[in-house]
Amino acid sequence: MLDFKELEAFVWAVRLGSFRKAASHLHLTQPSVSERISRLESTVGERLLERSARPIQPTMRGREFFLHAERMLHQRDEAMQLFDSEETFSAPLRVGTIETIAHSWLPDFMRRLTGKHPDLVIELTVDYSPALNERLERNDLDILLAMNGYLAEDRIESMPLSPYEMGMFVAPVHAEMLLESPRQWMKTLPFISFGKKARPYEELLQYLAREKLKQPQIHSVSTLMTIARMTMEGLGFGALPVATMLDQWRSGELHRIALPRPLPDMHYDVIWRTANHPRFCRSIGRLAQACAEDYAQRRQNEMEDPDFEGRWVRPQYPTTHPQATTRQST
């Protein structure tokens, strides 16, 4: 089997025409260089150098082998340079993301990422968080933009992303009906949320339990935009990220319900396996954090703009209930 140390001794002996000069360049003794070249010749089964010539000359086969040896050493050096850089990666990057991010700041993230690494090829998978975490554990994905908490902490590294405020929305056709039955609004329509394996579904169940709603009817849907569509079609109350639904809320396709207390925010992270390229993944994480923060700030600025008109539905609540809270002014 070829040894890089033997190849180096041979290449430098040919380049410099001397065992002594090659030894000096490689910080070795002359006998060490001679021994390495002898082992190389024994491995290939032929003499590679004419030792009697001054300067030392390669044999015919030696000249041919020299070209390959130089190329192998160059490829080795290129491969090792991958580990000298914090933010380089040349293989396809397998990214997994949840749909909420895919419909918000992911395009900006992709533009910035490919602008920074123009040769990078991205393989994108959009799925819900439990499935993405399973694929990360199997090493089918390299990095996630998803909910954390599904894998052992000692096997992954993560960086938090800006959370999404959640809101309860309803189609305009039902807005008047809710005002006519203000105290029973939660019992008038089904709820529409993410799939049963997704954390927002469990959090909605817990929220409704705190609101004393027993055995709520909840349609579980695998995709964000399907939840939004079903809500706009009047099929139920949609529990949706406010920033992502801002355009539909502003246009009047959706009305937002003023809740007695806020729904839990949705929290996401950048996640990667500890065995994966940690320096590169951290640089990806910092980029994702910047994109998420910029998106959240832009959407917040839009909602705080005096010209913003998002329609609210304000049911009445029992006197023992805290006053309905919102995060935006009317």
Image: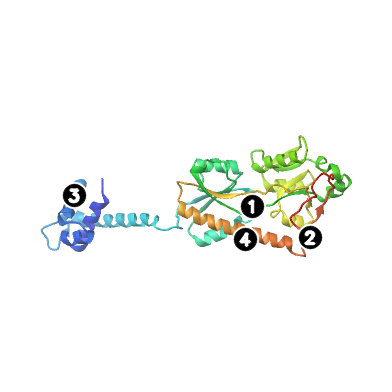
Give the crowd class for mark 4: few <14, some 14-19, many >=20 residues within 10 Å. Answer: some
Contact? badges 1 and 3 (CB < 8 Å): no
| Towards the viewer: 34 or 180 | 180
Contact? badges 4 and 1 (CB < 8 Å): no
Residue 194 visible in the snapshot: no
Give the side of residue 172 with respect to residue 10, left or right: right
Mark 4 or mark 1, earlier in chain = 1
Q: How is the image coloured?
A: rainbow
> Which label number is shown at residue 41?
3
Which residue is pictured at 20% across the width and 54% down the height?
61
Contact? badges 2 and 3 (CB < 8 Å): no
Mark 4 or mark 3, earlier in chain = 3
Q: Give how far apart the Cα atoms at labels 1 and 3 are.
A: 64 Å
Element on which disc 4 rests: helix
Residue 260: image x %, image y %? Answer: 78, 47
Give the amino acid type for the residue marked by disc 4 in the picture. Answer: Asp
Q: Is residue 153 above or below residue 161?
A: above
Mark 1 or mark 2, earlier in chain = 1
Seen as rendered, the residue at the extreme bottom is 306
Mark 2, mark 3: which one is toward the viewer? 2
Q: Give how far apart the Cα atoms at labels 4 and 3 are.
A: 62 Å
Mark 4, mark 1: which one is toward the viewer? 1
Mark 1 or mark 3, earlier in chain = 3
Based on the displayed image, in which of its 4 quarters is residue 310 positioned? bottom right
Residue 207: image x %, image y %? Answer: 72, 42
